[in-house]
Image (spheres, rainbow, N blue to C red):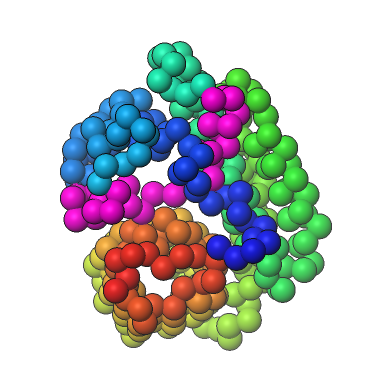
Amino acid sequence: MQAGDPMAHLRADCANCAAICCVAPAMSRSADFAIDKPVGRPCPNLTPELRCAIHADLRFRGFAGCAAYDCFGAGQRVTAAFGGVDWRAGEQVGARMFSAFAVLRRLHELLWYLGEALELSSSEPLAAELRAGQADVEGQAASAPEALESLDIAPLQIRVDSLLDQASVRARAAVPPPRTDAAGADLIGQDLRQRPLRGAALRGAYLIGADLRGADLGLADMMGADLRGARLHGADLGEALFLTQSQIGSATGGPDTLLPERLDRPPHFV
């Protein structure tokens, strides 16, 4: 994270959070989680100091999903909104906090994408609409916790998604056709090393375990693409669109994987 980072408030700050992500979500025993855990139950690895006892070894202890998780800064914001009272104060407080967190995380994710879209020079014709959308999302995110719990963000989500789609189309137009359109496609486990992926539409694509070694993913729309276990060694994602820390954290890569400056290199990319 750089000084003056406009997305600083959208980055997780665990030191100022009541470990909400270790309690609120459910876990299902799988390749991502070593245990089953229902919604609202603290993870057994959570210490009394609200820290993860195995944080440094999450991936090696069977909790790759936790290692890749990103709350987009919603955790510390909800914690602050409750003024020092957290989920340990009782079931009702916990339920309210977890409900607010679920909504705020979605809003913060939208803010992340809008912030990125505004950084694209190709988005200049959309700048006013993007800033208006940003202001509206931030306005809802600033709601009191009790309002967040019952907030219907679907209409705003639809509006923002439309703007982000327009921003994506404008950015990817810089890549001469033909451009790969694999939005929502099932590409699980496929070898995509020879596919032309620069400027590709990969929004919502299933890229679990896909071989993307050496791939040029510049200006490819990666929003919501499932990269769990994808092989990104030598891949160029430096200009990839709408890529998040969580997506990168769920993939595999190395020091030769090029990432956007706004994202941190995961510790397992060695």
Looking at the image, residue 75 lies above or below residue 65: above
Quarter of the image where the C terminus is located: bottom left
Q: Judge whether residue 183 is colored magenta.
A: no
Looking at the image, residue 189 lies above or below residue 17: below
Q: Residue at x 72, y 68 (%)?
A: 123
Q: Residue at x 60, y 28 (%)?
A: 81
Q: Which is more toward the observer, 64 or 229?
A: 64
Q: Is residue 121 left or right of residue 210?
A: right
Quarter of the image where the N terminus is located: bottom right
> To which quarter of the image does residue 191 belong?
bottom left
x and y, in percent, of residue 169 in the image = 62, 69
Looking at the image, residue 172 lies above or below residue 59: below
Q: Residue at x 67, y 70 (%)?
A: 120
Magenta segment's dominant SS is: helix
Q: Residue at x 58, y 50 (%)?
A: 10
Q: Give the residues in magenta.
A: 55-84
x and y, in percent, of residue 194 in the image = 34, 85
> To which quarter of the image does residue 175 belong?
bottom right
Looking at the image, residue 173 lies above or below residue 100: below
x and y, in percent, of residue 9 in the image = 61, 49
> To which quarter of the image does residue 122 belong?
bottom right
Is residue 210 visible in the rendered image? The answer is: yes
Q: Is residue 148 left or right of residue 220?
A: right
Is residue 222 visible in the rendered image? The answer is: no
Question: Disc count in the image?
Answer: 0
x and y, in percent, of residue 202 in the image = 45, 66
